Amino acid sequence: ALCHLGIAPSIARSQASPRLRPLAEAQGHRAESEMSTTAVESAAPAPVPPAAAAPAVVQPKKVIPPEEECKQLIRDDPYLGPFLGALKYRFHRYKETKRKIEDYEGGLEKFSRGYERFGFNRKEGGVEYREWAPGARAVYVFGDFNGWNRGSHPCTRDNYGVWSTFIPDKPDGSPGIKHGSKVKILVHTATGEHADRIPAWIRRAVQDGSVLFDGVYWDPPEAEKYVWKYPRPSRPKNLRIYESHVGMATKDCRVGFYTEFRDYVLPRVKALGYTAVQIMAIMEHAYYASFGYHVTNFFAV
C-alpha cells in the first residue's frame, strides 16, 4: 500500500528529503533476538540517493547504545529478556535516524511539516507541486484544470530526485487549479510503465461511483476554512497512549462515525486514565479490515 506511486518503496517512507533514511525502515526491519552487538556494529545503513553537486558529508562514528539503557527495559519487563539483542539494534537505529533528521531536516518539528513543501501548495502567482520520486523517469500533472491532458504539464527533477512544476494563475487572477477540482500525476517508471497515481501528499481523495480514487486539490477560501473552536489541551506530565480506529470503534458491522467515537469511546478513554489518543488511519483507506494500513494516500481524510 505504501508503494502506491509505483516507483520505489522509498518514496512512501520519507516525508521530506532523499538524504534521510526513513523511520519506517528502522521500525519495519526484522531484527532477530539473537543478534549480537557485533552484528549491530557491522550493520551498514541503506544507501541514500546521491546529490550531483552536494559537498561530501563526513558521517560521525556510529554510537551503539549502552547496554545498560536496554537492560533497564528488561528490569521493568522481564518478558523482554530474550529480545535484548533486537532491542539494542532497534534503539541504535532510532538514535541514528533521529540524528539524521536533526542534521538534514532541522529537527523533528520542522521535519513533520513536510506538507508545507510537498504536494500542492499555494505560492505567489500560482500553485507549486513537488513530489520526491527518485526512481521515476518522468512525472506529469494533469486533471480537471487542463482537461486531463497527460502531457501538458511536465515536472522537472532536481539533484535529489524531487520533481516539481508550477501552475500559474490565469490572466484574470483566478487560480490555475480550482479548489475542489480533481488532479492526478502520470509517472513514467524505471521499468517503462506509464501509471496514473494519486499524489502522495494530496490533502483529499474521493471515490465517485468507481473502484478508483481521485485526488482533489484542496485550497478553500478563507470564509470556508475550519476555525478551531476549543483551545489546545495542555501537555500531560505522563504519556499514556490509547490506540484506536474510528471506523471500527462500534459493535455493529458497519463503519463507525466520528460523532459516535466522540460520544462513546472518548469518555471511556478518559475514564481509564489515558492522556493521549493514537487514531489509526485518519488517512482515507478503501479496505477497513486492513486497520488503515492500505491507505489510498498519506494525508487525505
Image (cartoon, rainbow, N blue to C red):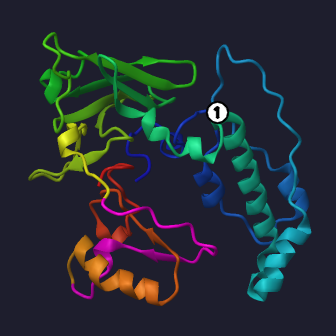
Q: Where's residue 46, x and y in %? A: 69, 42
- Residue 141, quarter of picture: top left
Residue at (26% x, 60% y) in the render: 286
User: Can you see residue 148?
Assistant: no
Percent coordinates x, y for residue 178 in the rendering:
17, 30
Q: Residue at x 26, y 47 (%)?
A: 204
The residue depicted at 74 percent of the width and 45 percent of the height is 99
Residue located beneath label 1 in the image: 19
Q: Mark 1: which secondary structure?
A: loop
Q: Which residues are magenta?
A: 229-252
252 to the left or right of 47: left
Was residue 39 drawn as part of the magenta stretch in this picture? no
Q: How dense is the environment of label 1, judged by Cα within 10 Å: few (below 14), some, or many (20 and up)?
A: some
Numbered circles on residues, count = 1
Residue in the foreground of this view, choosing between 170 and 247: 170
- Is residue 225 shown above or below 143? below
Q: Is residue 147 above or below residue 88?
A: above
Residue sitting farthest toward the top: 171
Q: Nearer the viewer, residue 239 or 181?
A: 239
